[in-house]
Image (tube, rainbow, N blue to C red):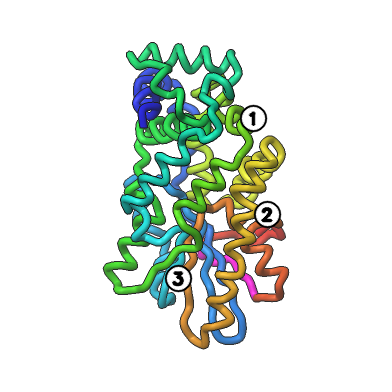
Amino acid sequence: MKSRLLAFALCALLLPAAHADQPAADAKRPLLWKVSDADSAVYLLGSFHLLKEDDYPLPAEVDRAFDDSASLLFEVAPAAMNAPESVAAMQKYMGYEDGKTLSTVLPKAALDKLGTLVSASGGSLQALEQSEPWAVNLGLVLGITQAMGFRQELGLDRKLMARAQEAGKPAAGLETVEDQLRAMDAVPYAEQAQGLEEFLDDPRKSIREMSDMHAWWRTGDVAKLDAQMRAEMARKTPESYRLLDVERNQAWLPQVEKRLSESRKDNTLVVVGALHLLGSDGLVEQLRAKGYTVERMCDSCAAATPAE
């Protein structure tokens, strides 16, 4: 993605100043819950899609959940991750189908800042004209995170997909890649532009936020992730929250329940983005509300709070 290259150029200037503010994250506590009925269980594991080498090995609780599960469920099936049709779908949804362009949906002030960034890296704003704001923003964020040392191939999903294949455990998806892209594409242009504007206004803030979110995930800090990430998204961009979080959770819930109702002994490990497990809209609380036994699996956590 062209905008990812722009982020690398930007990071050369921004990262030295940002590193000083990065919090320590030595403890490893998983965002892992066990949901049980009378005869089987589903483990819900909150993932971080890009990680670093020192995030491994995983906490022992995750290893135990993996070993205790006969199968795994991810957001999308492992086979779809790099399939040609997935790449084609990405190219389709990144662009416009209504005749608009980036210049027509992005406010002039943000467009000027993006143009300055493009020029500084030797590129052309014209090359991004056919990309929707969410796609440009995604490219910038991925570039920033890679420059910070995060890697997609080290993401928890991909690591556990590989591990499941090695162990001969079947793995399936809760949705298709096109389902994901369709949800992102449905976000109103105003909210798409808002996310890109926030990045362009203060790229250092994006670096700090990524560092903070990673630290909270690594230490299993449910309260911080819920308040600073999930609730903030719901407040600032309610349509994005509805489309990307709430509606997808609602679509996934029957599939997770099915693993409990149809199984008599086989357990399942469900691995989804951490924010999908948090808050009253999250899978954890929705399953608890249905009467299932729900417990946080965390050896070193303090006594569970109501939020957990």
Q: Is residue 166 left or right of residue 176?
A: left
Q: Is residue 119 magenta?
A: no
Query: Which residue in the protein does label 1 denote?
Result: 190
The amino acid type found where label 3 is placed reads Ala
Q: CA distance from mark 3 to mark 1?
A: 41 Å
The N terminus: image quadrant: top left
Q: Nearer the viewer, residue 39 or 87?
A: 87
Q: Is residue 174 left or right of residue 305?
A: left
Can residue 32 be seen here? The reply is: yes
The amino acid type found where label 1 is placed reads Ala
Q: Determine the residue positioned at 58% across, 14% down.
A: 108
Query: Which residue in the protein does label 3 denote?
Result: 65
Task: Name the quadrant containing residue 9.
Answer: top left
Mark 3: secondary structure: helix
Up-down relation of residue 264 to residue 282 (above or below): below
Query: Which residue in the protein does label 2 denote?
Result: 279
The span shown in magenta is: 293-299
Up-down relation of residue 165 to residue 113 (above or below): below
Which is in the foreground here, disc 3 or disc 1?
1
Q: CA distance from mark 3 to mark 2?
A: 23 Å
Q: CA distance from mark 2 to mark 1?
A: 25 Å
Which is in the foreground here, disc 2 or disc 1?
1
Mark 1: secondary structure: helix
Where residue 10 appears, as percent x and y from the top left, is 40, 20
Binning the other alpha carbons within 10 Å of mark 2 as few (below 14), some (14 to 19) or many (20 upward) gives many
Q: Determine the residue positioned at 52% across, 30% down.
A: 133
Q: Determine the residue positioned at 32% across, 48% down.
A: 153
Which is in the foreground here, disc 3 or disc 2?
2
